[in-house]
């Protein structure tokens, strides 16, 4: 029956292979963020392995929380020139032109038609 390797032998073998491993102290929070969800790990243990110039992070333990992300609705940026153009073409105020451009997603033709028909 063969005994397991001692920690000293393990470190020596890892060094020969070009692999070093260190603990990252005082990690409070690790967050993985995807387009659909966020995974939060509180008070994890994090080890960093260096293998021939590459760093690998190993995260273990801690309290794991997952939450779905709600996509934010972005308002289009409306240039002032577009607002003036729509206002001039329709004879409406700058505020009405800007509101029409926001409703049409910044589309000049749609905004003008919206103000002319409304």
Image (cartoon, grey):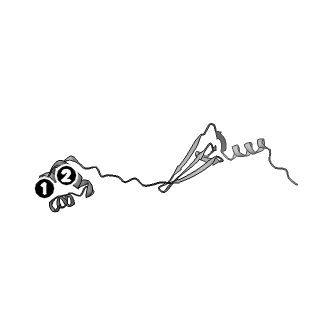
Residue 30 occupies quadrant: top right
User: Which mark is drawn over residue 90?
Assistant: 1
Residue name at image x 12 percent, y 52 percent: 88
Q: Nearer the viewer, mark 2 or mark 1?
A: 2
Which x, y percent locates residue 3? 85, 50
Residue 89 occupies quadrant: bottom left
Task: Kindly report the distance in space between the C-alpha atoms of the residues bearing marks 2 and 1.
Answer: 10 Å
Q: Is residue 90 left or right of residue 98?
A: left
> Which residue bears the numbered disc 2?
96
Q: Is residue 86 left or right of residue 33?
A: left
Q: Are marks 2 and 1 in contact (CB under 8 Å)?
A: yes
Residue name at image x 22 percent, y 55 percent: 100
First reached walking from the N terminus: tag 2 or tag 1 = 1
The N terminus, quarter of image: bottom right
Q: Is residue 32 left or right of residue 112?
A: right
Which x, y percent locates residue 74? 35, 52
Name the residue at the right extreme.
1
Q: Is residue 86 left or right of residue 8?
A: left
Q: In terms of secondary structure, where does tag 2 sit?
A: helix
Which residue is more in the foreground, 95 or 38?
95
């Amino acid at each position: 029956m063969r005994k397991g390797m001692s920690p000293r032998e393990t470190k020596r073998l890892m060094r020969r292979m070009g692999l070093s491993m260190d603990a990252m102290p005082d990690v409070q929070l690790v967050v993985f963020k995807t387009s659909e969800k966020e995974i939060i790990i509180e008070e994890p243990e994090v080890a960093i392995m260096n293998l021939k110039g590459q760093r690998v992070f190993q995260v273990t333990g801690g309290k794991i929380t997952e939450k779905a992300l709600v996509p934010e609705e972005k308002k289009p940026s409306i240039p002032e020139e577009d607002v003036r153009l729509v206002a001039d073409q329709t004879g409406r105020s700058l505020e009405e032109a800007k509101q029409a451009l926001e409703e049409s997603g910044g589309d000049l033709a749609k905004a003008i038609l919206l103000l002319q028909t409304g």
